[in-house]
Image (tube, rainbow, N blue to C red):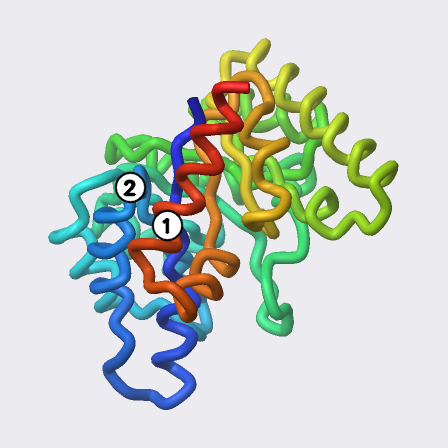
């Protein structure tokens, strides 16, 4: 059954809009755990637009489930990860001007840079996952670097307008997922998943972890964080048993 990783970045987005101390993403993490979160995910961006260094430090001391640090393959962020030692680091692409992550990491085109980062993380015993598009070339490159897992970018599936387009994107995710499993990689999914579209992805054979942020935070504004996480986890559990 797929586990639920709750990305709490956008709790920090609300806080940073006023440059104040609330809402605190650390509290959100605790409430997410009460709602059944299996993983707490944060993306420490180079521009610190939402999650701050302090948040990650406190989360490392307080989170009782797996802490997954999303990060660019840049030395300054790598140095921070080597200090904090999250249980998992997920390498993602990053552009200063983007609203949110726009696609998967190009491992093939940035092999040496990614390798340097992966090797340093591995030396400290950090499990490494790469956030990539559902491409066999990218999966093969991830495997060659010795990474334990991939997180397949589900953005094109989430953005699909017509049912036929959505079916095509879902089929691509299934094929890539099967290939990743044949390569011996753990299989994660994330980006753009919502209460309306999560179940077909959760039902993909071998899906182990779904990382979801914006939709849960948006729902939490209406029903509370614990309830929003509980509702998402119930959908994932139901899909895993179909």
Crowding at label 2, few (<14), some or many (≥20) Cα neighbours within 10 Å?
many
Vertical comparison of 60 with 188: above or below: below
Which residue is nearer to you in this view: 108 or 204?
Answer: 204
Instruction: Tell whether 147 sits left or right of 197.
Output: left
Q: Residue furthest left?
A: 61
Q: What residue is shown at x 41% (from left), y 70% (from top)?
A: 221
Vertical comparison of 163 with 74: above or below: above
What label sits on residue 53 in the rendered view? none
Vertical comparison of 232 with 25: above or below: above
**Regarding mark 2 in the picture, which secondary structure is present there?**
loop
Instruction: Tell whether 57 sits left or right of 199.
Output: left
- In this view of the protein, can residue 108 be seen by the observer? yes
The percent position of residue 1, horizontal first and vertical second, equals 43, 22
The percent position of residue 78, horizontal first and vertical second, equals 36, 51
What label sits on residue 229 in the rendered view? 1
N-terminal label among 2 and 1: 2
Quadrant into which the C terminus falls: top right
Which residue is nearer to you in this view: 147 or 98?
Answer: 98
Crowding at label 1, few (<14), some or many (≥20) Cα neighbours within 10 Å?
many
The percent position of residue 21, horizontal first and vertical second, equals 24, 82
**Regarding mark 1 in the picture, which secondary structure is present there?**
helix
Q: What residue is shown at x 68% (from left), y 23% (from top)?
A: 174
Q: What residue is shown at x 24% (from left), y 56% (from top)?
A: 31
Q: Are marks 2 and 1 in contact (CB under 8 Å)?
A: yes
How far apart are the two marked residues, 2 and 1, measured between alpha carbons?
A: 7 Å
Residue position marked by numbered label 2 in the rendering: 36
């Amino acid at each position: 059954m797929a586990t639920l990783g709750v990305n709490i970045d956008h709790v920090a987005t609300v806080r940073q809009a006023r440059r104040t101390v609330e809402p605190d993403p650390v509290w959100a993490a605790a409430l997410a755990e009460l709602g059944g979160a299996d993983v707490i995910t944060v993306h420490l961006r180079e521009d610190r637009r939402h999650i701050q260094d302090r948040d990650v430090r406190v989360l490392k001391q307080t989170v009782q489930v797996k802490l997954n640090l999303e990060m660019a393959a840049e030395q300054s962020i790598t140095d921070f990860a080597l200090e904090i030692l999250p249980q998992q680091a997920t390498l993602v692409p990053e552009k200063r001007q983007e609203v949110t992550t726009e696609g998967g990491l190009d491992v093939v085109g940035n092999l040496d840079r990614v390798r340097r980062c992966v090797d340093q993380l591995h030396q400290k015993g950090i499990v490494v996952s790469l956030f990539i598009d559902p491409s066999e070339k990218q999966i093969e490159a991830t495997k060659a670097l010795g990474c334990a897992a991939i997180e397949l970018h589900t953005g094109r599936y989430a953005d699909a307008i017509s049912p036929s387009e959505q079916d095509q994107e879902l089929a691509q995710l299934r094929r890539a997922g099967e290939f990743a499993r044949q390569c011996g990689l753990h299989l994660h999914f994330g980006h753009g998943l919502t209460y309306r579209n999560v179940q077909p992805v959760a039902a993909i054979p071998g899906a182990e972890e779904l990382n979801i942020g914006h939709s849960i935070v948006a729902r939490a504004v209406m029903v509370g964080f614990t309830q929003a996480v509980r509702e998402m986890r119930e959908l994932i559990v139901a899909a895993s048993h179909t």
